[in-house]
Amino acid sequence: MVSRVIPVDPFDLVIFGATGDLARRKILPGLYRRFWAGQMPPVARVIGAARSDMTEAAFRDLARAAIEDYVGARKRDAETIAAFLDRLSYVAVDATGEAGWTDLTAALRPDVVPAFYFSVGPALFGPIAERLHAHHMVRPESRVVVEKPFGHDLSSAQELNAVLAASFEEHQIYRIDHYLGKETVQNLMAVRFANVLFEPLWNAQYVDHVQITVAESVGVEGRGGYYDKSGAMRDMVQNHLMQLLCLIAMEPPSRFEPDSVRDEKLKVIRALDPVSPGDIVRGQYRAGPEGGSYLDAAGDRGSRTESFVALKVHVSNWRWAGTPFYLRTGKRLRARVSEIAVVFKDPPHFIFDDHENRRGNVLSIRLQPDEGMTMRVTIKEPGPGGMRLVEVPLDMSFAEALGEDAADMPDAYARLIMDVIRGNQTLFMRGDEVEAAWAWTDPVIAGWAARGDRPKPYDQGSSGPEDALMLMHRDGRRWREIEG
Ligand code: BG6
């Protein structure tokens, strides 16, 4: 299979917060990979903007170090790195003052796509947007990219939407949820909507339940300050898990175009029932051989913030009434695994004697590691000895299907940034979607505070607190193993 890389239009991408962690870990390495692959046109330019008074050479050194740290050796050669660094420049700007804005205006070319990446805290969205506007840098074809956290609750998200709307139209705003840029997430849509096989079974009549697991083996080290004000519900469920749930549960859009897809996702969020307190389990990891406890990382011994959450969710519509969705996510769990499992019902009548090996079909959609999809089916065990049943995986792993190309697959950030330049918002969240997700999340969090709930402690390297297992057991179901 030969990958087709179509270069995007020439652009000027301004990265606000260009010396920050996200720029170094994701944005600059991602852009470099696309340059290496021939997708970023040679005339495109990346303009770093941050408060520090840095020379262009120093910014290029920072980018070189980022590429060396985060891009695999196979894609790093001196010539390509030098050509990429040549596309980089730097302007020192004060997001809340006047310094640097005239220089930035002068750095932009009138005949290329202008894109502004706000890789800064949400408090700076407004001041930066206002200054871009005041300095006439916002044109009809300008795009602005914003990062999560997009608000802390519904009212702060509404404020951010209002602040952006004062300078940009909705079609210019790209709210990133990097989970939507993952290869498997898009493949999920292809599998659902480009095949006739799954859709007739994709409903409460045939699907017993759905499990969405986003498990991480890392803790919150170094991010304790941010994380403790957020917790797993805000940091992961309100955005990443919610987006995965939407893609599984949504109706087929009439077209694969941004608003058709986002309209259907929004309907799912609006169809979510409020979660009852008995359907949620929160946890905090204890200290273990791997490291200190969550409370150590949070720096607050009395913290009630959760590093783990598991919950049962109902989508109240004709397709899903009666099929629960179980979601869980947490830090310091057994392995780093992101997986969606669609667990089908048993056949209505079983004709074989081998009840021991009676298993339902499960479609597992794996985001990481080993991206791909597997369908568990039951067949006859080969050979003589009667009708013995055995389960086998029907493997739809992309890595194998793509052969060597799999290694060159763009990562989520690189793919999403190229979509920004292409002007394609399909994989970005619309303002009303984000608000609807907060409107569902807020009462859950408010409920914990009102009841004074404390998260349950759990061991590092485990699957979370015991109560999370019970959430499923009491329904006669069980979580899939967290296996890396
Ligand atoms: C981020 C969260 O959005 O996603 C982090 O803030 C989390 O807490 C990360 O670790 C997980 O992303 P990925 O791509 O590594 O699964």
Image: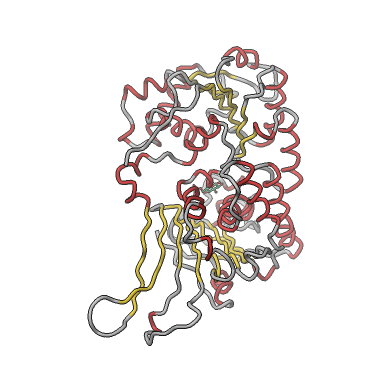
Residue lying furthest bottom: 353
Towards the viewer: 256 or 116: 256
**Residue 420, picture quadrant:** top right
Residue lying furthest left: 384
Towards the viewer: 93 or 82: 82
User: Which residue lies at the image location 52% right of the left edge and 37% below the top edge?
Assistant: 416
Q: Confirm whether residue 419 shows in the render.
A: yes
| Location of residue 416 with respect to 203 vertically, above or below | above
Towards the viewer: 159 or 99: 159
| Location of residue 224 with respect to 393 vertically, above or below | above
Q: Give the mark count.
A: 0
Q: Say how the picture is coloured.
A: secondary structure
Q: Does 136 sit left or right of 254 as displayed? A: right
Towards the viewer: 463 or 236: 236
Q: What is the quadrant of the N terminus in the image?
A: top left
Q: What is the quadrant of the C terminus in the image?
A: bottom left
Q: Confirm whether residue 232 shows in the render.
A: no
Spot occupied by residue 393 in the image (x, y as percentages of width and height): 36, 65
Q: Does 17 sit left or right of 99 as displayed? A: left
Spot occupied by residue 449 in the image (x, y as percentages of width and height): 73, 60
Spot occupied by residue 129 in the image (x, y as percentages of width and height): 69, 27
User: Which residue lies at the image location 76% right of the left edge and 45% below the top edge?
Assistant: 155
